[in-house]
Amino acid sequence: MSCGCKTSGDSAHSCGTKSANGCESVNTCGNSYKLSVFDWLSNVQNPASNRCDFVEVRFKNDRKSFYKNVNNIPLHIGSVVTVESSPGHDVGVVSLSGELVKIQMKKKRFSTEDPLKIYRLANQKDIEVWQEARKKEETVKVDARKISHRLGLEMKITDVEYQGDGSKVTFYYTADNRVDFRMLIKEFAGTFRTKIDMKQIGFRQEAAKIGGIGSCGRELCCSTWLTDFRSVNTNVARYQQLSINPQKLAGQCGKLKCCLNYELDSYLDALSHFPSSSTMLDTEKGRAFCIKIDVFKKKMWFAYVDSSMAWYDFDIDLVKKLIAQNKKGERILPLEELKVPDIALPSVDLIQENSVDRFEKKNRGGFNKNRNQNQGQNPNQNRPNNNQGSRKDRPERNDRNDRPQKNERPATERPANSDRAERPRNTNPNAKPNPNQNPNQRQQKPQQPQQPKVQLEKEEANVNAEQKPQQPPKKKFKKKFPPKKDDNA
């Protein structure tokens, strides 16, 4: 038998399982039903002698019903069965069996009197008729919408479901007001030539049938696991300190989101320890009212009635003490004096996400530090002095090393720049002379501006060029041409 994957029952959408036991991975198959149930007691042997004869059968979308297995057919989750219906028969898929069916029947208050029966496992003919009827649903829905629009009815046909034998078709519609569809049923019966059944559903049930992705990024709760729809009002958003924005609070059904009810009990439990939001404090500076509540930090913000621009936050324990003082007839201090400055705790970034230079090398800071220290020193300090040391201190050359090295300059070629070392360090030409200094000495050694390094290098290059021996010019030889040949010879 075909697997119960996908609600359409089409073989093109099934996982390909052809077994009487059904699909072994019906709960994990990518095309499995919505609102699927996992039987945790499937591998546990029932200690009781009596066995549950009821099974849960599922039809298109989220419609389920319970049927009695009177013939004791071996059924498993995913088995396609033919069940009793009025009129004719219907084809569905077993979604749950075993002892869990009793719990579901008790939860949904299903009556066990005169239950519907399971006829047999669906044969190939039943499945072919079922699939042919399901293929016509989309075209029937489009035609039904055209007919309702022509009659001017304010309703929306959401879904169409054919019975397994094709003897009945059910139209699901949504409408804000009551709709008189007597003429509509006559039009449908004459067009589709079958029994017509009309069912009105709510907007939340419509979203559950269609399905989709919510703003949280997951599939809608109503189409996956949520079965009971509770009313949601705007007070739920106010308790949770949410802004009353219909575009953000409304779901795909156009109503308030069902998930607003999930954490409502926790918020109500936390707000029970807070003073009333309409609390007024009598201070020496004037009356103050509560303007904001933070449930997580357990704080309340107050502001003066006259000037509500400045807000002051206090813990709920302190607010309770202030309210007790007001009840005794005492006025409390101004809010700015009661406000304790918050101590900023140093935050430790364990993963260094906020560090901008976390990708740089660690020794770069030391390199920059040494570089900055060297910038403050005199650049001429590390320059070697040619006049330092006497000839006696220099090592004597051997006979083999009498020739100067390549990088070593002979003494005769050295420029006579001995006066450069005797120049004073003061390079400022506008500096005032020292009055304690001998005037004759100032005349003998006048201060001269220090020449730049580039100019000194040019002078050294000119001196070296003059000391190099001039090479004799090369002789120019005349080009000799071969003798011309005499043709008369």
Image: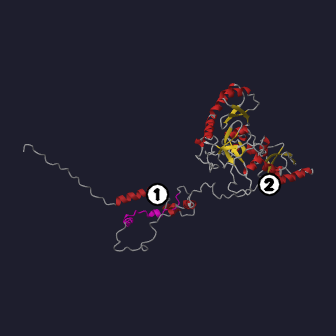
- Residue 67 locus on image (x, y percent): 72, 44
Is residue 259 among what the camera can see?
A: yes
Tag shown at residue 340 = 2
To which residue does mark 1 refer?
Answer: 453
Q: Name the residue at 20% across, 50% down.
A: 479
Mark 1 lies on a secondary structure that is helix
Quadrant of the image occupied by residue 146: top right
- Quarter of the image where one finds residue 387: bottom left
Disc 2 crowd, CA 10 A, few/some/many (<14, 14-19, 20+):
few
Question: What is the quadrant of the C terminus in the image?
Answer: top left
Residue that protrudes farthest toward the left in the picture: 489
Instruction: Please state which amino acid type lies under the numbered disc 2.
Output: Val
Q: Position of residue 96 (x, y in %)?
A: 69, 48
Position of residue 482 measured from the top left corner of the image (x, y, whole percent): 15, 49
Question: From which residue to which does the magenta span run?
Answer: 406-427
Who comes first in sequence, dot 1 or dot 2?
Answer: 2
Front residue of this view, candidates 299 and 41: 41
Q: Amino acid at mark 1?
A: Lys
Q: Quadrant of residue 65?
A: top right
> Which color scheme is applied?
secondary structure
How far apart, in angstroms, are the residues tagged by discs 1 and 2?
Answer: 66 Å
Q: Residue at x 34, y 73 (%)?
A: 400
Position above or below: 292 against 380: above
